[in-house]
Image (tube, grey):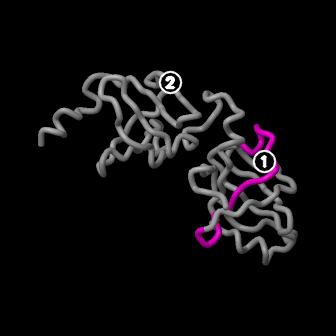
Amino acid sequence: MIKREEVYKIGIFNKPHGIHGELQFTFSDDIFDRVEAEYIICLLDGILVPFFIEEYRFRSDTTALMKLEGIDTAERARMFTNVEVYFPIKHAEQVAPDELTWNYFVGFRMEEIHYGHLGEVTDVDDSTLNTLFIVDRQGEELLIPAQEDFIVDIDQQHKVITVDLPQGLLNLDEAEEE
């Protein structure tokens, strides 16, 4: 059984394309094209299920048409509409950290060199020009800029990001006094 901590989200299937089971795929990470992996993982009814990739072709920087093995009709492909797509972390680890997308780091522990443990990265907000890590700090949500300038170290094996944030960005002392 595939566990949630063994994968990270790379996109979502939109709608079927054509009559032969091809799916429109909107992705936030093209890791499936950069790594030797023959499969992706779909979240179906709360269960992570692997599917072999038969073929794919890019339509833009964020969309591709993907054909999965065993999905040969538009009816079968319709079952994948709005299904989240994940990728195995073990295959993504073959890529250098600077070639990974920010979504890969969901689930990592974040440490700050002055404050220590900040919390766990629970999501990434890339809806604006400035991408943010959303970090859960004891039930509170911290928004940390996802900028390479602030990252001191990334330990993929232990899933830890060490950052050096500008003074005053966090204001943790004030938050703890309240």
**Up-down relation of residue 51 to residue 119 (above or below):** below
**Disc 1 element:** strand
Kind of residue at disc 2? Asp
- Residue 36 at x, y percent in the picture: 81, 40
Residue in the foreground of this view, choosing between 47 and 9: 47
**The residue stretch that appears in magenta:** 31-46
Q: Quadrant of the C terminus?
A: top left
Residue in the foreground of this view, choosing between 78 and 142: 142
Position of 129 with respect to 25 (left or right) is left
Circle 2: is it few (<14), some (14-19), or many (20+) Cα within 10 Å? Answer: some
The residue to which callout 1 is attached is: 58
Specify the farthest residue to the left.
Answer: 178
**Residue 56 within the segment the image draws in magenta:** no
Q: In this figure, what is the number of numbered marks?
A: 2
Residue that appears at 77% across and 60% down? 51
Residue that appears at 45% across and 48% down? 122
**Disc 2 element:** strand
The residue to which callout 2 is attached is: 153
Residue that appears at 83% across and 60% down? 67
